[in-house]
Amino acid sequence: MNAEPIVQTGGDVTFLRDCWYMAALARDVKPGGMLRKLLLGEPVVVGRMKNGDLFALRDICPHRGVPLSAGKVLGDASVECPYHGWRFKKDGVCSLIPSTVDGQDNIDPSKIRVRSYPVREQDGLIWVYFAANERAQPASEPPRVPIPNAKPRWVESQTFTCGIDHAVIGLMDPAHAPYVHGRWWWRVTPREKIKHYEPLPNGFVMTRHAPSKAAYKIIGGADVSTEITFELPSTRFENIRGTIFGRQVDVSGLTVCTPIDANNTQVTQIFFWPAWLGFLKPFFMVLGPTFLGDDRRIVELQKQGLEFNPSLMLIQDSDVPAMWYHRLKKAWADSVANGTPFVNPVKPRTLRWRS
């Protein structure tokens, strides 16, 4: 049997750097508001100044360690610590220490800073960039939703009690559906699938094809087709295309895994569609929480076995996307560590499995 070991079995997780991670929905961060987040095991406050400018800062005041997110956003475009009133601009530089008095020139607030993270608002989402060198600027931009003027129309987010690797390979796994998601109203009889894959700059794509499930016709009519992409560190798009009422329909489903820490991952599914397709929302309100909940429960069961640190394996062909993920991740980590260009190890290939 052609098999290879899984890299991660327990809490020993490598978080990729020089990458964008989704932190929040844009609508959840109002002007003057802040969200306290734990991202990649790091405390981060994501917020907006009152003028609407976004910021992301390490959520620890360097004076006494109090979370800045417990303070407030001020009109001078600064964040005030709730303990002693120290203020920090969106670049992390301290702008005021209220307790200092005239003559104490040896204290220069501008020499004090908290870590600031590059942050972007795009397609209704907020992304935070985690660089290997904290002063480095992003070498890329966050992934774009392939629909013009995209807005999140439906969102479901759940916390998986596993590291990011198991969350990612569980969601890209093509063979689990009949057993994890099987219901009387969802086909459960496995049958052979043949899908072609091509490399992408930072991942791979299951090329466009006619989906086997009749439910897709609700979204895109009789001529519906779909493609599924994955790119590092943890972004999966399913791009559905079809025709309804004589109009071309493009619906994009984004699943993104954001590491909370080594043992917990926030998994968020977001669907984007044109405003005139609002009748689709009840369909996703039923399927989305149900299927994502199925995936969450199976990794909770998996955790019971992983506590004993067993040897695991990946097999052909249904586990090849998981193999690609681990190879992509290693190639990316090596390129960042060595300062060399990233080379995608994935090659074009047709895979066969039964599901």
Image (cartoon, grey):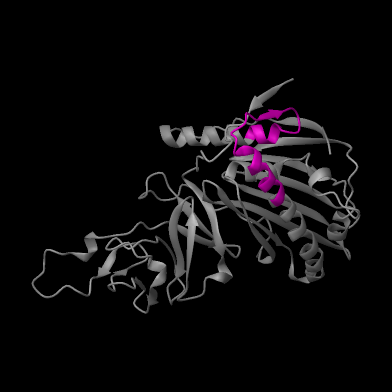
Return the residue nearer the eye: 60 or 271: 60
Q: Using the rendered view, name the quadrant where residue 169 is placed.
A: top right
Q: Residue furthest bottom?
A: 75
Does residue 275 appear to the left or right of 127 in the view shown?
A: right
Residue 275 visible (yes or no):
yes
Residue 140 visible (yes or no):
no
Is 186 colored magenta in this rendering? no
Return the residue nearer the eye: 346 or 148: 346
Taking 174 as reference, is 122 above or below it? below
Q: Using the rendered view, name the quadrant where residue 220 is placed.
A: bottom right
**Residue 279 position in % (x across, y down):** 82, 70
Residue at screen point 65% across, 30% down: 312
Which residues, given as a range, are shown in magenta? 297-324
Residue at screen point 38% across, 67% down: 68
**Residue 35 position in % (x across, y down):** 49, 67
**Residue 102 position in % (x across, y down):** 10, 75
**Residue 55 position in % (x across, y down):** 43, 65
Does residue 243 appear to the left or right of 232 in the view shown?
A: right
Does residue 164 appear to the left or right of 48 in the view shown?
A: right
Taking 295 as reference, is 82 above or below it? below
- Is the N terminus in the top left, top right, bottom left or bottom right quadrant? top right
Q: Residue furthest top?
A: 1
Does residue 301 appear to the left or right of 115 in the view shown?
A: right
- Is the C terminus in the top left, top right, bottom left or bottom right quadrant? top right
